[in-house]
Amino acid sequence: MPTAPNVDLHCHSTVSDGTLAPAALARRASANGVQIWALTDHDETGGLAEAAAAAEKLDLHFVPGVEISVSVGHQTVHIVGLGIDFANPVLLAGLAQVRAGRDTRARLMAQALEQHTRVRGAYAGACRYAGNPALISRTHFARFLVEQGVCGNTHEVFGRFLTPGNPGYVEHAWATLQDAVGWIRAAGGHAVIAHPGRYRFTATEEWALFTSFKEMGGAGVEVMTGSHSAADFRKYAGLALEFGLRASRGSDFHSPQESRCDLGGLPPLPADLAPIWELLH
């Protein structure tokens, strides 16, 4: 049997909340043996042209992507779009709509964090870490609090302050699931549920998410991703088969210092799954 290609279809650059520029990510992916690579910044396509040009010079198969923030109940779910036309006006208008509320949310997060940590200047401090001020995020606040010595690393910050039920978390209404899948499909892309093991759904709620996603034209689910355990790998491989979804593999790489998994470092997909990259050209 032929060896499966090394594929990484989920990572972030300085255009959203990563620490490496798009071209630097392309070089890192190539050096790590990745053969098919996607850049999927949060709610933004501004790094894709640079990424595509760098990948071409490296003879690296590049897949233009995006990761869209979606509200499902009281949770934020991420939907990755792969193989998109990143000049598509429907997609661009939708992403602009999603980005519009980020600054208000960031200022509310800063107020909450200052109240509970006694550290001042949280908004300005987070902005220093945001390569794109229009996309200030929880990750930028996490880096600031590590800098200030409040926590030892960004994972600790999220656990103590920035997830639902904790004092720095601010709920926000993002896109609907139907909107996100529709925008991706309008741009000729394939919609994928990102890192499903991270969400706090009951079994019934998760089943409803997968059912709705499939009915709306969703194409795939991340089975192999940096935040999944071995048990998650098995669980979502089973759900991919059950719902007739393509399987994706993506590290969700943000930073050499912070990420659990480097570009291209995940195990291969189980052989009985249909890879999403068979649909990408």
Image (cartoon, rainbow, N blue to C red):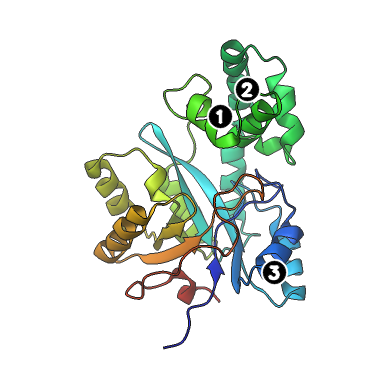
Q: Position of residue 87 (x, y in %)?
A: 66, 59
Q: Nearer the viewer, residue 122 or 210?
A: 122
Instruction: Tell me how far mark 1 sits from mark 3, CA to CA.
Output: 31 Å
Up/down of 150 relative to 72, above or below:
above
For mark 3, does the 10 Å Cα neighbourhood hold few (<14), some (14 to 19), or many (20 or more) residues? few
Name the residue: 38% across, 41% down.
199
Q: Circle 1 is placed at which residue position?
A: 157
- As helix, strand or loop, the secondary structure at mark 1 comes to helix
Q: Position of residue 171 (x, y in %)?
A: 47, 26
Q: Residues within 10 Å of mark 1 (few under 14, many from 20)?
A: many
Numbered tag placed on residue 218 in the rendering: none
Is 36 situated above or below 227? below
Report the residue that reaches farthest toward the front: 152
Amino acid type, callout 3: Ala
Q: Which residue is mark 3?
A: 31
Task: Name the secondary structure under disc 3.
Answer: helix
Q: Which residue is mark 2?
A: 150
Q: Are marks 1 and 2 in contact (CB under 8 Å)?
A: yes
Residue 64 figure quarter: bottom right
